[in-house]
Image (spheres, rainbow, N blue to C red):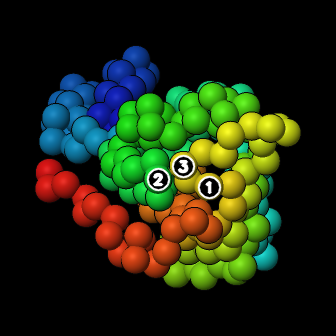
Amino acid sequence: MIHRTTLVTLAALALSACGGSSSDTAAADRAASTSSDTAYVPPPLPMPADSVVARIIPAMYSLMSTQWIVGDSALFAEMYLADSTDLWVAGVGAHWDRAQVAAGFGALGRSLGAKALERTSAGISIRDREVTDSGTFAVTLPAGARAPRMGIAGRYWTTWTYSPNGEWRILRDELLGDGFSARDRAARPARPAP
């Protein structure tokens, strides 16, 4: 990106090379020294249309499923906000940042030998740059595999955020297996104070 100061300095150099007066050069120098040295920040990308969002969210879940089953915990964790995420999986625990998501849940699929982690949406709600989605999840395991503590099926509640630069990230994510109850969800730990 070209800073305003750089542009003013280039204009002053061009002016002096073209035989401009010293007063023109001095004026350009003063403008350069008083101008803001901030980089150009493009305007935020507009939120996609609701019909597009309704196709994007399932595609993001499909990508996450692939990352989860192959054990790419770092890439899986990239789907969550860097330091203000909230992932809670009943029977697994709470995770408050990408490092915790990667260590605590991101590699679980591979260790289970999972074939898929599918989410089926019951519907999305869009408000400003946030998308709230809920539905059911199902983990597909090989025959004879032991089910994880979280269960192999249940409900989920996920809130996505759409950043000004066009990135989708998960703000909150909850998975509650069928073996757990609303009481378990209510008893989930609160986010620790910073």
Residue occupied by mark 2: 91
- C-alpha distance separating marks 3 and 1: 5 Å
Observer able to see residue 26? yes
- Asked whether the beta carbons under mark 3 and mark 1 sit within 8 Å of each other, the answer is yes
Question: Residue 149, labelled with which disc?
Answer: 3
The residue lying toward the viewer, choosing from 82 and 119, is 119
State the image coordinates of residue 98 (x, y, percent, origin top left): 42, 39
Say which residue appears at 68% left-offset and 40% top-offset: 146
Say which residue appears at 69% left-offset and 61% top-offset: 153
Which amino acid lies under the numbered mark 3 shown in the image of this protein? Arg
Residue occupied by mark 1: 151
Observer able to see residue 161? no
**In the rendered view, would you say 167 is above or below 125?**
above
Kindly state the secondary structure of the residue where label 2 is placed. loop
- Asked whether the beta carbons under mark 2 and mark 1 sit within 8 Å of each other, the answer is yes
Q: Residues within 10 Å of mark 1 (few under 14, many from 20)?
A: many
**In the rendered view, would you say 190 is above or below 165?**
below
Say which residue appears at 85% left-offset and 39% top-offset: 143
- C-alpha distance separating marks 2 and 1: 8 Å
Compare marks 3 and 2 and give the one earlier in the sequence: 2
- Report the side of 9 relative to 46 (left or right): left
State the image coordinates of residue 152 (x, y, percent, origin top left): 68, 54
Rendered image quadrant of residue 13: top left
Say which residue appears at 62% left-offset and 55% top-offset: 151
Rendered image quadrant of residue 103: top left
Question: Residue 31, labelled with which disc?
Answer: none
